[in-house]
Amino acid sequence: MIPQLWLVGYGAWPPAKRASGLVEALRGRGVTRLVDVRLSPCSSDPAEGRPYGPKPWNLQAGRAGLVGLLEAEGIAYEWLVELGNPQRRDPKMAILRAQLADPLGDWPVHRGLDRLESLIDRPGEIVAILCACEDWRTCHRSLVARALADRAFEGKLDLRDVLTGDPIPASPTMKP
Ligand SMILES: [Zn+2]
């Protein structure tokens, strides 16, 4: 069987339904482990109740945020900071593409890919990668996923969108 990796962006749900929508969608796909590929999954404002204050989809100390939300559903969580987009002011993701394509292969993203590969290879583990962006087409998670497929699985990694269940096609423009 071809190994599988699911892709999800919590921006697909409005804030009021975000936590429940994300969890329900992951459960519906049988996901056992959510790998966070945001560069910063923490709230940008530490104060409770403010617009950018801590939310259930932020990483918070203890089990207040995403870890506890997922744990209640039996889904493990792991933040792979190495898989974050290293430069957010780079809409074409040229910097991430250049790092992925570097034959030296010793950027943080390569360490993150090694770890992600080992998680996918675990028997019974069904992995999804999480970013904030609604659409995988414009999110670095699709670059990361395609790079992993090429680098570790010789292209034989079934990439799918959690929201639609559709396969994420191999596209030359998305290749690093
Ligand atoms: Zn993103």
Image (tube, rainbow, N blue to C red):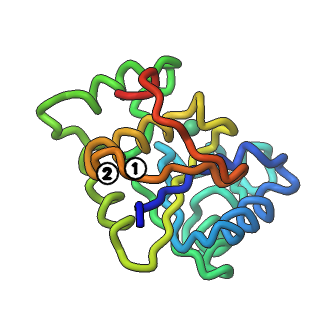
In the image, what residue occupies the spot 48% across and 17% down?
92
Count of marks overlaid on the render = 2
Which amino acid lies under the numbered mark 1 shown in the image of this protein? Val
Q: Earlier in the sequence, mark 1 or mark 2?
A: 1
Where 149 sits versus 100, above or below? below
Residue 135: numbered disc: none
> Which residue, given by chain and number where applicable, does mark 2 sit on?
112
Position in image of residue 83 (x %, y %)? 39, 45
Which amino acid lies under the numbered mark 2 shown in the image of this protein? Gly
Where 142 sits versus 89, above or below? below
In the image, what residue occupies the spot 35% across and 26% down?
97
SS type, badge 1 = helix
- Callout 2: 10 Å neighbours few (<14), some, many (20+)? many
For residue 98, what is the image quadrant?
top left
Indicate the quadrant containing the N terminus: top left, top right, bottom left or bottom right: bottom left
For residue 22, what is the image quadrant?
bottom right
In space, the residues marked 1 and 2 are separated at their CA atoms by 8 Å
Residue 6 or residue 110, whichever sits in front: 6
Q: Say if mark 1 contacts mark 2, CB within 8 Å.
A: yes
Indicate the quadrant containing the C terminus: top left, top right, bottom left or bottom right: top left
- Outermost residue, front direction? 1
SS type, badge 2 = helix
Position in image of residue 168 (x %, y %)? 55, 41
* 140 relative position to 164: left or right: left
Mark 1 against mark 2, which lies toward the viewer? 2
Position in image of residue 123 (x %, y %)? 38, 78
- Outermost residue, right direction? 16
> Which residue, given by chain and number where applicable, does mark 1 sit on?
81
